[in-house]
Image: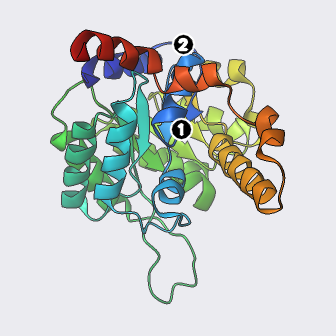
Amino acid sequence: MNPTPRRERFRSILDGDRCVYAASVFDPISARIAEDLGFEVGMLAGSVASATVLGAPDLVVLTLTELAQQLHRICRAGELPLLVDADHGYGNALNVMRTVEELENAGTAGLTIEDTLLPRGFGDGGARRMVPLEEGVGKMKAAVAARRDPALVIAARTSALRFSGVQETVRRARAYRETGVDALFLAGARSREEVAAVRAEVNLPLVLGGASEELLDPDFLAANGVRIALQGHQPFRAAVKAVYDALQALKEGVDPNELASRLAPADLMAQVTRSGDYSRWEDEFLG
């Protein structure tokens, strides 16, 4: 696995003039499917990683080691450039440096570090807050300093639109830009006006997450600096429902043969497991 070429492809998207939709992936098979279908970039979200690895909700109970291991499994399975949600970097600025080191070594093309105060603190009633701007800047500086492959993309992720509005988002975005990050991940954008206002003040490629229906127009997004947009995490939820429905049917006594129409056909299974490659290697190396 040589991650640099896929990182360069990722950067070419950020440097371009199109808006690309990222495939939400969660394991090697889902990443291969996305690659085979022609997606140009994948996204491993923290919430999806937590559900896949731990069967747990998105409460930052997943550890850096567990995230890096799952990321490595996905990256080694193909050539799809991957953006990974590294949450808050799993601690302070020094933890952020360790996070960048581990995720870079795992093969990611890019990663996001956010300025939300995580995990939930004792007695805070579950309210979400952001870290002070100075702490956020320190984390972004640490992330950039920890990078070894200059092709690795580091995106500053801010929740300011959700918590404080456009003015605070612009203030933070400008400060993060000065640290040398490569992109700005906007969480919680709801309107075209918000995106346009941020773009007018901050000349960084934008990554859009959690967008409203108003922000589904790729032409508008491209014209306003959005280079990668997320569409949610439907693939993982679809997989959960498919497994649930199949097991439920079997538990209720349905003839397994009656489930054939719901199952991946043999040729698709061969494709996603790269069975042809293994057959060739068997012939070549095992005689």
Query: What amino acid does circle 1 point to?
Result: Val
Q: Mark 2 points at which residue?
A: 17
- Which residue is found at the position 50% from the left and 90% from the top? 123
> Mark 1 falls on what kind of element?
loop
Residue 65 is tagged as none
Q: Earlier in the sequence, mark 1 or mark 2?
A: 2
Q: Is 88 drawn above or below residue 204 in the view shown?
A: below
Q: Position of residue 215 (x, y in %)?
A: 73, 34
Q: Where is residue 269 in the image (x, y as percent from the top left)?
A: 58, 27
Residue at 38% x, 65% y is 132
| Horizontal side of residue 2 vs 47, given as left or right | left
Residue type, mark 2 in image: Asp
Q: Where is residue 45 in the image (x, y as percent from the top left)?
A: 50, 47
Residue 226 visible somewhere in the drawing:
no
Q: In this view, does 269 lie to the left or right of 2?
A: right
Kindly identify the residue that appears in the image at 42 percent across and 69 percent down. Answer: 61
Residue 109 sits above or below residue 113 on the image:
above
Give the quarter of the image for residue 265: top right
State how far apart marks 1 and 2 are (Cα).
24 Å
Say which quadrant the C terminus sits in.
top left
Task: Give the residue displayed 47% in from the left and 63% down from the top.
Answer: 54
Badge 1 local density, few (<14 within 10 Å), some, or many (20+)?
Answer: many
Q: Name the residue under label 1.
A: 25
Q: Where is residue 273 in the image (x, y as percent from the top left)?
A: 48, 27
